[in-house]
Image: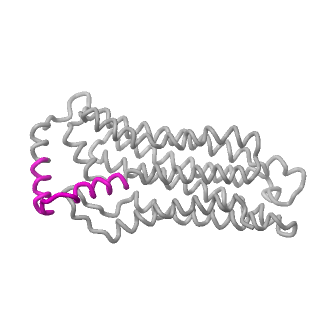
Amino acid sequence: MTSGRIIGVIVTSVICLVCIVTRTTYRIVYRCKIHVSCHRRWHVDDIWMGISFFPLLGRALCVAWSDTAARHPSTYETSMKLLLPARIFYALFLWCMKMCLLELYLRICKNLPMYRKIGLWIRASLYMTFIIIVLLTLLECRPIKLMWNGEPAGDQCRRARLNLISMAVANIITDIALIVFPISFLRQAGLDFSKFIRLGILFALGSLIIITTLVRLPLILRDDAQAIRSMWASIEIACASVVANAPFFQAVFIDMQLGGSHNKSIAERRQSQLTNLSNRRKSNSSRVNSDRRVSLWHIEERLDRVF
């Protein structure tokens, strides 16, 4: 009989797999000719999305195998050993989603040196926090065999409280950085209010992961059964996948809107887009002034073309 833990992992994996396969297939196969700013090429953030398939699959296999092995006393040790790679794969998937978003933001602020430098610092922080989480996960039980040998001395470290708390803290801090960073350079642009709100909401979707982390942490500290931890990890993985892919699917939706239900030919629509963009540049051709405010047309062009 399939346990609820495995069902949760399967559902989460399917949701994430649909997002990953849809995005990577679209980048590789589909040649977009809908409008002038539509140039769906393969980018660094798409590489991170493709890489995320491997930790997603690795976690699913480890959790399923661990759950099956835990039902038999003879394979209990194997079940506990599999928890370590499962937790590392879980962290790796989340950090792949963070890198995917960050690389997208770095493309948006490509010509803004100050913000690009901040983005590079965030990138370095993501690398460092992931390494720290992996080390804490592996070193929480010393010697590591206490994790699976069933000795009373290992009861405390088998609960993996250090892994839980360090993951939660690092997750919240990095997600806050990934929310504040894009909104900060949007505020420096002369975007109209409606567009600022729309993009602000899109970039602030990461707050879903923060909320999930804040909710799950006290619940797991009260009841740290492995089934509960796996359930909340699956929820967090699904939220992270949705957040990381939201800008891509929004761009595809806009492409479809621009390309459908119009009588104009594609060439005419392209020319119209070029004319409108040129006019907007002329009317908003202010340079970056002393307080580093970015002109409207510069940011709008980057946002139109970056996805």
Q: Quadrant of the N terminus?
A: bottom right
Q: Is residue 63 magenta?
A: no
Residue 118 placed where, x, y %?
A: 40, 40
User: How many discs appear?
Assistant: 0
Judge whether 202 appears above or below 32 on screen.
Answer: above
Q: Left or right: where does residue 230 sit relative to residue 78?
A: left
Judge whether 58 appears above or below 181 on screen.
Answer: below
Q: Quadrant of the C terminus?
A: bottom left
Residue 206 placed where, x, y %?
A: 48, 43
The one nearer the camera, 292 or 250, is 250
Residue 71 placed where, x, y %?
A: 82, 65
Q: How is the image coloured?
A: one colour
Query: At 10% from the left edge and 59% from the top edge, which residue is drawn?
Result: 268
What span is colored magenta in the figure? 249-276
Q: Left or right: where does residue 31 sit relative to residue 87?
A: left
The one nearer the camera, 270 or 96, is 270
> Is the magenta region chiefly helix, strand or loop?
helix
Query: What residue occupies the far top of the structure in this picture?
Result: 291
Q: Quadrant of residue 9?
A: bottom right
